[in-house]
Image (cartoon, helix red, strand yellow):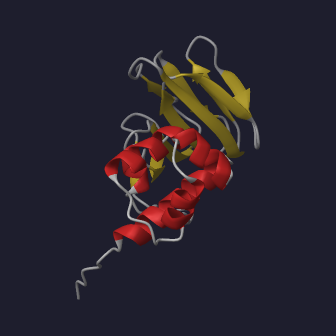
Amino acid sequence: MNESRQVNPKALVAASLKRERARAGLSLTELARRAGIGKSTLSQLESGEGNPSVETLWSLSTALGVQFSALLDSPAPTVEVIRFGEGPLIPAADADYSATLLSTAAPGSRRDMYVIRAEPGKPRVSAPHARGVVEHVVISAGRARLGPSDAAEELGPGDYISYPGDVEHVFDALEPGTVAVMLSETF
């Protein structure tokens, strides 16, 4: 059954304004001042009773430092659970190494998160990624030697490493059952 859901624009703007104002840590008075609108106007918008104009929403988005669309867009769900061993498992061709994508980058951001499972044997050597890629890795279980191929470090459970992903890099599991969480981001 596919139900269409009608969204009340006033309620959407009200919820978005409250959310973004809280994220920015601004009082109602301060946001109204920065946006150049009346405090009562902002109060009405946040209560879902005002009729926002395009100009008012532009002023508010600028004062909040967010895209205009952030005031018209429903927030994505905030809780997502992927149990260990669930999700699509993508194996490496030449090493006992696999990755499960946990979280993709939202539009406008540039990061992906993976859980890595690797076994001792042939190391996983990665060719340089796009310019500006940085990888962040936390070892959850086991031990591994990882990082730039010419400067890899040995890490154990709880250890963190960050390194440029736009150079050749390696992940070499040193113990059976090595597991890590990797965040890849682009600057």
Which residue is depicted at the point 43% across and 71% down? 11
Q: Left or right of 145: which side holds 66?
A: left
Q: Left or right of 159: which side holds 64?
A: left
Which residue is depicted at the point 39% across and 58% down? 52
145 and 180: which is toward the camera: 180
104 and 7: which is toward the camera: 7
Which residue is depicted at the point 41% across and 63% down? 74
36 and 121: which is toward the camera: 36
19 and 128: which is toward the camera: 19
Is residue 10 among the parts visible in the rendering?
Answer: yes
Which residue is depicted at the point 48% across and 63% down? 45
Is residue 97 among the parts visible in the rendering?
Answer: no
The answer to whether 107 is drawn above or below residue 43 in the figure is above
The answer to whether 186 is drawn above or below residue 5 in the figure is above
Residue 180 percent coordinates (x, y):
62, 44
Residue 177 percent coordinates (x, y):
63, 50
Residue 155 percent coordinates (x, y):
73, 32
The answer to whether 86 is drawn above or below residue 61 in the figure is below
Q: Name the image quarter holding residue 127.
A: top left
